[in-house]
Amino acid sequence: MILSLTPAADCCCDIGTDHGYLAAALAKRGGRVIAADVNAAPLASAARNLRRFGAANAETRLSDGFSAIAEGEAGCAVLAGMGGDLIRRVISAGIKGTKWLVLQPQSLVYELRGFLCESGFAIRDEALCREDGRFYTAMLVTRGRMSLGEAELRLGPALMAKRPPLFAPYVEDEMRKLRLALEKIRQNGADTENAAEYRRLLALYGGVLNGEAERNN
Ligand SMILES: C[S@@+](CC[C@H](N)C(=O)[O-])C[C@H]1O[C@@H](n2cnc3c(N)ncnc32)[C@H](O)[C@@H]1O
């Protein structure tokens, strides 16, 4: 999914590469690839895998975020499998003129989209997949202006616009988690503030599924 969202670039870096599998797949497509990680152990495993896959056009580089990437060196960077707060911190520290970012946050997706909106980034595309019953989203981001309503911040503006086949199951799964949380509150006693918020979100998501007005809500 991440590969399909990543634009071709003369040089692409995979920040937080870990095992280096994505870097190997990017290298196979062509262009120069930098498999970067802040920790030496994952970088060594990436180096092993890149050799194993014959990815001669990929190098490994010890780097905290973009710190060891030169200004303008990479046209594209992927930050995948990290928490949304870590992705936000890495972007805030500077992206060295990288035009395209492909982000695949494991958490705090709503907060990350909000941060991107406030920081002069725009989401150009999004993708969604499901593995072992869990949903994952990824987004293609570049500099630009973007104003999103709450449903778009929570469920993804491009996903809402494109409505891929997994979109309805994804929203239904989010609603299932909210109902579960409401049921826990019901069993454990009053937490009226959270319960009201969960009910509000259930109504919002139900509206999205039913195709009700969803921009700037
Ligand atoms: C869970 S792995 C994700 C691996 C891979 N990107 C994926 O999606 O499967 C997170 C990786 O990010 C690295 N990492 C954490 N903070 C980082 C930072 N500030 N800069 C670069 N890499 C970082 C960790 O060392 C780890 O290898």
Image (spheres, rainbow, N blue to C red):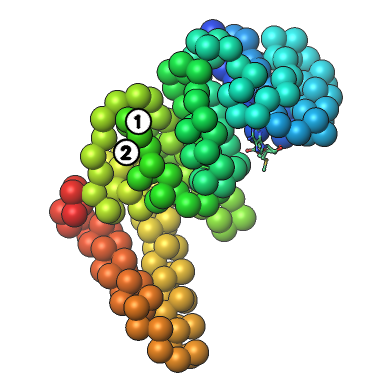
Q: Secondary structure at mark 2?
A: helix
Q: Which residue is mark 1?
A: 121
Q: What amino acid type should be assigned to the residue bearing mark 1?
A: Phe
Q: In the picture shown, does residue 34 fall above or below 109?
A: above
Number of numbered labels in the structure image: 2
Would residue 48 be visible to someone looking at this image? yes
Residue 210: x and y in percent read: 22, 60
Q: Give the quarter of the image for residue 40.
A: top right
Give the residue type that dot 2 points to: Cys
Badge 2 is on which residue? Answer: 117
Task: Report x, y in % for residue 47.
Answer: 80, 22
- Say which mark, if any, is on residue 42: none
Q: In the image, ligand 1 is in what quadrant?
A: top right
Query: Quadrant of the image for the C terminus?
Result: bottom left
- 10 Å crowding of disc 1: few (<14), some (14-19), many (20+): some
Q: Position of residue 87 (x, y in %)?
A: 53, 39
Q: Eyeballing the image, is 91 above or below 187?
A: above
Q: Is residue 160 visible?
A: no
Whole-Å distance between the Cαs marked 1 and 2? 6 Å
Report the residue at 47% width, 44% height from top: 137
Q: Is residue 36 above or below residue 126?
A: above
| Picture residue at 36% right of the left edge, 51% below the top | 155
